[in-house]
Image (tube, grey):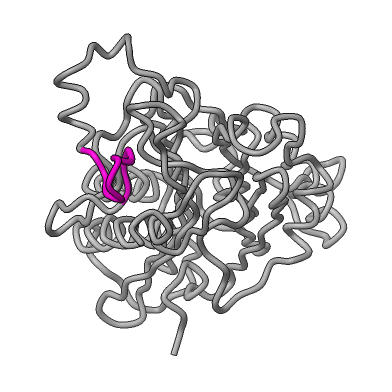
Amino acid sequence: MPPDSITAIPGLRVGHWTDRRAATGCTVVLCETGAVAAVDVRGGAPGTRETDVLRPGNLVERAHAVILSGGSAFGLDAAAGVMRYLEEQGVGLPTPGGLVPIVVGAVLYDLSVGRSDVRPDAAAGYAACRAAKGGRIPQGSVGAGSGATVGKALGMGRAVKGGIGVASERAAGDIIVGALVAVNCFGEVVEPDSGCILAGPRDEKGGFLNTLEILRRRPASALSGGFTNSTIGVVATNARLNREQAYRLAVMAHDGLSRAVRPAHTPVDGDVFFSLATGVAEGSVDPITLGALTARAVERAIVRAVTEARGLAGVPSVGEWRR
């Protein structure tokens, strides 16, 4: 039985590098045979690498890895380690001067948690590649989710632990879609079907406050939490898609984010989703179904990111706060 994870898609491996003392880390999704790739950037404060190359109409169509990292803009250095690893494996885009691995990525801000002077670097990216595997992978306070936090409408002092989560969905035939999401949002995480708050600004009684009600009562300029957010992720499928269809998959991934995070895509969130299509499945699926299942996988991955997280660097997890 394939795992309920993005690694249910054959050919994809996921690896984490985690520094629990510093509360930071990075996560890599490897597709060494290459996958048709696209990206959709929605948040107002993104930190990204090589997103222009993924625009429809550009020369390069396939990517070999996606790196998600903590460390804010410093964390973009982790991609150099992924590049080195793939080069050693003989993986990359053929060019007259040799193979060039196509590594895309995004970062989240975790410098307010743990140690701000420790960030994922090239060695961290390389280590994440060395740790990459298929099957079941760790979730919660690991990799890019190590320093992630949720519910910051009242500042970091009332936030709760975010993290990284995975999920997958099956369509007719052999078509699979999966999601991996690092959740580090300004808003709260809700149960998508009921709207109940799963993780948000902490109250005084072991529960959570409603972010929308906080915003109603206080001017946005008085709220803290700027620069400390982003929900970044990867969605993938084994279906055969072109660049435009892969882009639509990334767009619909944000629907899942909007249903599980309230509010999403704010000016202080750098929300980004990459999409990968390996094209190895024999069957086909209509794009409406594929997109809807992608959004559902994202919803479930976001919920797991906070429910699987553990307290770190003084920020309690959902389970610890509700006891």
Q: Which x, y percent locates residue 44? A: 40, 22
Question: What residue do we see at 26% from left, 63% from top?
Answer: 293
Q: Is residue 238 above or below residue 274?
A: below
- Residue 128, by quadrant, is bottom right
Question: What residue do we see at 12% from left, 57% from top?
Answer: 194
Compared across the picture, whether 29 is left or right of 268 comes to right
Q: Which x, y percent locates residue 169? A: 32, 71
- Residue 184, by quadrant, is top left
Question: Residue 204 colored magenta?
Answer: yes
Q: Main secondary structure of the magenta part?
A: loop
Question: What residue do we see at 47% from left, 67% from top?
Answer: 6
Compared across the picture, whether 113 is left or right of 46 comes to right
Question: Which residue appears farthest toward the bottom when viewing the image?
Answer: 1
Q: Which residues are magenta?
A: 199-209
Question: Residue 57 colored magenta?
Answer: no
Q: Which x, y percent locates residue 244? A: 37, 44
Question: What residue do we see at 24% from left, 58% from top?
Answer: 287
User: Could you say which is closer to the camera, residue 208 or residue 68?
Assistant: 208
Q: Is residue 311 above or below residue 172?
A: above
Q: Which x, y percent locates residue 171? A: 27, 74
User: Could you say which is closer to the camera, residue 30 or residue 151?
Assistant: 151
